[in-house]
C-alpha cells in the first residue's frame, strides 16, 4: 500500500490521464456533418487547453513534496491550492468537451458516427467524474498538511485511499467507453478519420 506521499504523487500526476482519455479531435467524413465537425473540433480545443494546463503544472508534485519535507506547510498548501485550481480549470474544459461531443452525437448524422461521438462523450464525462472525486482526496491531503493530530492525518489517508479507489474504478469505466468508440472508428474508417 502506498504511503501518503506516494498517494500524493499519484494524485498530482493524474491530470495527465484526463488529457489522454479525452482523446484528440478527429474529422468526421462524408455527408453534411459541418455542425458535428465544428463541435468535435471545439472539443479538441478544450482538450488542447487541458494539455496546456497539464504542462504548466507538471512540476507541482515535486514542489509540494519538497515543501512538505522541508516543513513549509504554508508553501505546501499554497502549491496544493494552485494544483486544485488547475484541476478545476481542467475539469471545466473536460465538461465543455463532453457536452460538445454529446451535442454532436445527437445531430442528424450517420448512426456509426453518432455512436462514436456518444461513447467519446460518455468516456470524457466519466473521466471528469473521476477527477472530481480525486480532487476530494487532494483537498483532504491539503487539509492535513502540517497537522500533528494523528486522527486528522489518519482521516486524510483514509479519504485519499477511498477517493483513489473510486477514481480508479471511474477511470476504468472511462477507458472501457473510449475502447468502444475506438472500435467503432476502426470498423468505420471511411466515416471516422483521425487527425486534425
Image: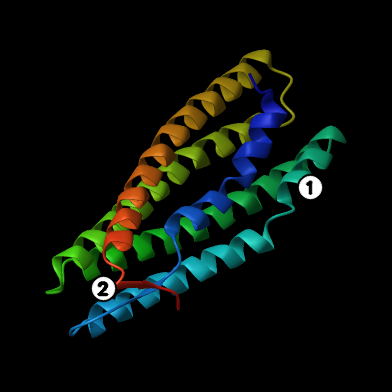
> In the image, what residue occupies the spot 75% across and 43% down?
64
Give the residue at the far top of this rendering.
150
Q: Which residue is mark 2?
A: 191
Secondary structure of the residue carrying numbered label 2: loop
Q: Quick check: 172 left or right of 39?
A: right
If you read the primary sequence from the N terminus, does the residue marked by circle 1 or circle 2 appear first?
1
> In the image, what residue occupies the spot 65% across and 21% down?
153
- Quadrant placement of the C terminus: bottom left
The answer to whether the residues at label 1 and label 2 have Cβ atoms under 8 Å apart is no
Q: Quick check: 114 left or right of 136?
A: left
Instruction: Compare residues 176 and 72 and report the one nearer the observer.
Output: 176
Image x and y of residue 2, in percent:
66, 23
Residue 89, placed above or below residue 77: below
Instruction: Compare residues 193 and 162 and report the one nearer the observer.
Output: 193
> In the image, what residue occupies the spot 43% across and 41% down?
171
Task: Answer with the quarter of the image where residue 9 lies.
Answer: top right
Q: Residues within 10 Å of mark 1 (few under 14, many from 20)?
A: some
Instruction: Compare residues 116 and 54 and report the one nearer the observer.
Output: 116
Which label was assigned to residue 63?
A: 1
Q: Quick check: 184 left or right of 18?
A: left
Give the residue at the far right of this rendering.
70
Task: Answer with the quarter of the image where residue 66 lies.
Answer: top right
Image x and y of residue 79, in percent:
71, 49
Give the residue at the far left of this rendering.
108
Image x and y of residue 74, in percent:
76, 42
Q: CA distance from mark 1 to mark 2?
A: 46 Å
Which label was assigned to residue 121?
A: none
**Pair 1/2: label in front:** 2
> In the image, what residue occupies the spot 45% across and 69% down?
46
Amino acid at each position: 500500500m502506498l504511503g501518503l506521499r506516494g498517494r500524493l504523487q499519484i494524485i498530482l500526476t493524474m491530470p495527465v490521464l484526463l488529457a489522454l482519455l479525452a482523446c484528440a479531435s478527429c474529422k468526421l467524413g462524408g455527408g453534411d456533418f459541418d455542425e458535428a465537425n465544428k463541435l468535435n473540433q471545439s472539443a479538441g480545443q478544450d482538450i488542447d487547453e487541458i494539455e496546456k494546463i497539464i504542462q504548466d503544472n507538471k512540476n507541482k508534485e515535486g514542489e509540494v513534496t519538497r515543501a512538505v519535507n522541508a516543513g513549509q506547510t504554508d508553501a505546501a498548501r499554497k502549491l496544493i491550492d494552485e494544483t486544485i485550481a488547475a484541476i478545476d480549470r481542467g475539469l471545466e474544459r473536460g465538461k465543455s468537451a463532453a457536452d460538445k461531443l454529446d451535442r454532436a452525437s445527437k445531430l442528424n448524422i450517420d448512426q456509426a458516427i453518432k455512436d462514436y461521438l456518444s461513447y467519446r462523450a460518455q468516456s470524457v464525462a466519466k473521466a471528469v467524474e473521476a477527477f472530481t472525486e480525486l480532487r476530494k482526496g487532494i483537498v483532504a491531503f491539503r487539509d492535513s498538511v502540517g497537522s500533528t493530530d494523528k486522527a486528522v492525518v489518519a482521516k486524510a489517508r483514509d479519504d485519499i485511499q477511498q477517493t483513489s479507489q473510486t477514481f480508479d474504478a471511474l477511470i476504468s469505466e472511462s477507458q472501457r467507453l473510449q475502447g468502444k468508440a475506438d472500435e467503432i472508428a476502426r470498423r468505420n474508417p471511411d466515416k471516422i478519420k483521425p487527425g486534425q
